[in-house]
Image (cartoon, helix red, strand yellow):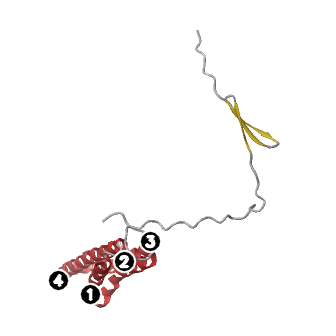
């Protein structure tokens, strides 16, 4: 004894003079396509997209980007003063922490990065100086030169990302 298969619905498309007829499972549905001669090949005007919702705050997008970039580029103050970079980023955070969560986030991240880099540089040069007395420290000088320049490359990259409006999820 052989089991019978259930009947499958066959879907077919037939082209008729007035439009397209879809045939399948015992029903016919007629659809038509019309050309709009006035719009043929012309881009339609659509509504402008609403601005994406922000976290809150009253700053414009350009202002947020500018202050976020300045918070990251405050690292370059360390070239002149040695330590005022984190202070400048902290002041930006204090001023804009209630006005813009994005600027506050970038400024606080810049403070943390700068403090971490300054500690690493001070500890690294101290160890290099102590080991130079034993003549092994001369091998660390090229490494410490790279470590000293690394915060500026990192701050420039973070400023670029902040200007493009990219945010990091970690923190």
| Of marks 3 and 1, the one in the foreground | 3
Asked whether the residues under the numbered discs 4 and 1 touch, taking CB atoms below 8 Å apart as contact, a structural biologist would say: no
Q: Circle 2 — which element?
A: helix
Task: Answer whether labels 1 and 2 touch (C-beta < 8 Å).
Answer: no
Q: Quadrant of residue 116?
A: bottom left
Q: CA distance from mark 1 to mark 2?
A: 15 Å
The residue that mark 4 highlights is 133
Front residue of 155/16: it is 16
Image x and y of residue 50, in percent: 51, 66
Vertically, is 98 above or below 169?
below
Of the residues under marks 2 and 3, which one precedes in the sequence?
2
- Crowding around mark 3 (Cα neighbors within 10 Å: few <14, some 14 to 19, many 20+) is some
The residue carrying mark 1 is 82
Badge number at residue 13: none
Q: Which residue is mark 3?
A: 165
The mark that comes first in sequence, 3 or 4, is 4
- Tell whether 91 sits left or right of 39: left
How far apart marks 2 and 3 lie (CA) works out to: 15 Å
Distance CA(mark 3)–CA(mark 4): 48 Å
Whether label 3 touches label 4, CB < 8 Å:
no
Return the x and y of residue 79 as percentages of the image width and height. Answer: 32, 88
Residue 132, image quadrant: bottom left
Q: CA distance from mark 4 to mark 2?
A: 33 Å
Locate the C terminus and report the quarter of the image it occupies. bottom left
Residue topped by disc 2: 155
- Residue 93 location in percent, x, y? 30, 78
Vertical placement of residue 134 versus 53, above or below: below
In primary-sequence order, the first of circles 4 and 1 is: 1
Sequence-wise, the earlier of marks 3 and 1 is: 1
Q: Nearer the viewer, mark 3 or mark 4?
A: 3
In front: 161, or 91?
91
113 on left or right of 62:
left
């Amino acid at each position: 004894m052989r089991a019978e298969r259930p009947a499958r619905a066959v879907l077919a498309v037939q082209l008729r003079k007035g439009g397209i007829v879809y045939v399948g499972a015992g029903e016919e549905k007629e659809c038509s396509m019309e050309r709009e001669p006035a719009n043929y090949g012309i881009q339609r005007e659509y509504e402008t997209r609403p601005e994406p919702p922000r976290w809150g705050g009253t700053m414009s997008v350009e202002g947020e980007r500018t202050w976020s970039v300045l918070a990251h580029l405050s690292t370059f103050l360390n070239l002149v003063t040695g330590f005022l970079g984190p202070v400048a980023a902290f002041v930006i955070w204090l001023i804009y922490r209630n006005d813009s969560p994005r600027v506050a986030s970038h400024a606080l991240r810049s403070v943390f990065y700068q403090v971490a880099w300054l500690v690493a540089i001070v500890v690294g040069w101290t160890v290099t100086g102590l080991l130079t007395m034993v003549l092994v420290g001369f091998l660390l000088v090229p490494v410490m030169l790279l470590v000293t320049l690394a915060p500026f490359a990192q701050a420039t990259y973070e400023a670029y990302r902040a200007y493009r409006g990219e945010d990091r999820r970690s923190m």
